[in-house]
Image: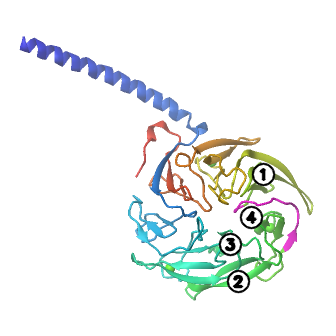
Amino acid sequence: MLSANLFMTNMLHFLLAICFASFSIMLAGAQSTAAAKDANSPVRFVKKLIASESYESVGVFDVNNDNIPDLVSGSFWYPGPDYVQRNFIGVVDRIGEYWDDFSTIPLDVNGDGKIDFVTGGWFGKKLYWKENPGTNGEWKQHLIAEPGNIETTRAWDIDGDGINEIVPNTPNDPLTVYRLVKGSNGKGAGSFEAFKIYNGKSGHGLGFGDINGDGRGDFVLTNGWLEAPPDAFKGTWTFHPDFGFGDASVPIIVADVNSDGQNDIIVGQGHGYGLHWYEHKKNKDKHDWIKHTIDPFNSQYHTMEWVDIDNDGKEELVTGKRYRAHNDKDAGAHDYVGLYYFKWNGESFTKQVISYGPFGEGKGAGLYFSIAALTPSGRKDIIVAGKDGLCIFYNNGSDNSTQGVKK
Ligand SMILES: [Ca+2]
Ligand SMILES: [Ca+2]
Ligand SMILES: [Ca+2]
Ligand SMILES: [Ca+2]
C-alpha cells in the first residue's frame, strides 16, 4: 500500500514536471514574440522611493569616486548602488514650504578631482557652490554671485571648451553667464567670471540651442531669443523678440522636432496648463514660429529633458508636473501629479505615462530632475525629487524578460 502511494506520488510529480516544462516552452515562445515587438513597445519603469524628503532638485554624480553614480538632493547624498544610506551635506534654508535650493549641477569647481555642485535659490537671491569634502563631513558653501531671485539654474557648454557654464534663470534681472576660471592645469580654480549678456529682465524660462543654424548656441528667453556673437564672451548678443511664452519652463528645449533641418522649440507652462512645441520656419533672416499643442490638460510643466529614453536612437521629451510649484496658487495645483515621456510619432507627440495619480501614488518631476544610467544595463533611469518625495524610476527597457530592478 505504501509503495503504491509512493508510485502515485512519483507519477504526479512526473506529470507536473511535464506540464511545467510545456508551460516554460510556451512562455519562452511568448517572450521571444514579445521581444520581436520591442521596437515599438513603450519602456517599462519600476519606481523606488528613496526618501520622503521635499527638496525639489536632485543631481546624479559620483561623489565618492568609486565609479558608481550617487544621488545628491538637498541636505543629503545617497551612495549608490543602493541609495539607502544618507550622508549629511549641510543645512538648506527653509522658507515656507520651500527649500531654497533649486538646482544640483555637478562641477568640479576647485579642480581637486572631487565633484562639487552648484545651486541657488529664489528667496536668498544667491548662487553658490558646495564643496565636496571627500569625507562624510559637511560640504562648505561658497558664494558665486548675488544675481537676484533665481527660479532655477542650468548649465550649458556655451564656448565649446568641454566645461559647462552656469546660467541661473533670474526672471526679474538681467541674464548673466558664469564661466569657471581654469588654472594652468586646465581644471577649475575655484572661482567664476561673470558675463552679463542681456540687460533687460530675463523673464520666467530659459533654454539654449542653435536657433539660426550658424553653429553657435543661442539663448531662449520667454519673450525672445538671444543670437550668439562669434565670441560668446566678447561680442554682443542680439535680442529677437519673436514670441511670448508666459511663465515658461526651465529648460526650454531647442531641438529639430520634425527633422526638417530647422531647430524648433518645446516649452512647458511652469505655473499653468499647457505643453507646446513651436515649429520653426526660417526664411532668410526671418523666423516664424507655428504653435502646436502637445498636452493642454496638465499644468506646471516646469522642467523637461530631451533625451533618448527608449534607446531607439531618437530623443523623447521627458517631463512632468512640478507638485505644488506655487503652493496652492497655480492653475491645476490640485490635479493629479505625473511623470511622462512624449514620443514623436512622425506627425505629433504620443504621451506615455510613467507615473500618474494623487499625491503619494503618482509622482511629479520637481524643479530639477536627472536622467542617468544607474545600473550596468546602461539604460537611462529617471531620478526625480519634489515636494512629493525623492524617487528613482528604473528603466527596464521594453523587453518582457527584463522585469525587475537590475543592479
Ligand atoms: Ca572639487
Ligand atoms: Ca546660433
Ligand atoms: Ca524643425
Ligand atoms: Ca528614443
Task: Tell me how far mark 4 sits from mark 3, CA to CA.
Answer: 11 Å
| Disc 4 CB within 8 Å of nearest ligand 2 atom | no
Name the residue type under label 4: Gly
Can you tell which of label 4 and label 2 is closer to the viewer? 4
Residue 155 magenta-drawn? no
User: Considering only order in the chain, which callout, 3 or 1, is on the residue closer to the N terminus?
Assistant: 3
Amino acid type, label 3: Ile
- Residues drawn in magenta: 238-251
What residue is pinned by disc 2? 194
Mark 2 vs mark 1: which is more N-terminal?
2
* Contact, mark 1 vs mark 3 (Cβ under 8 Å): no
The answer to which of marks 3 and 2 sits earlier in the sequence is 3
Residue at the spot of label 3: 150
Does residue 215 appear in this view? no
In space, the residues marked 2 and 1 are separated at their CA atoms by 32 Å
Would you name the residue on which mark 4 appears? 205
The percent coordinates of residue 396 (x first, y second) are: 49, 45
In which quadrant is the N terminus drawn? top left
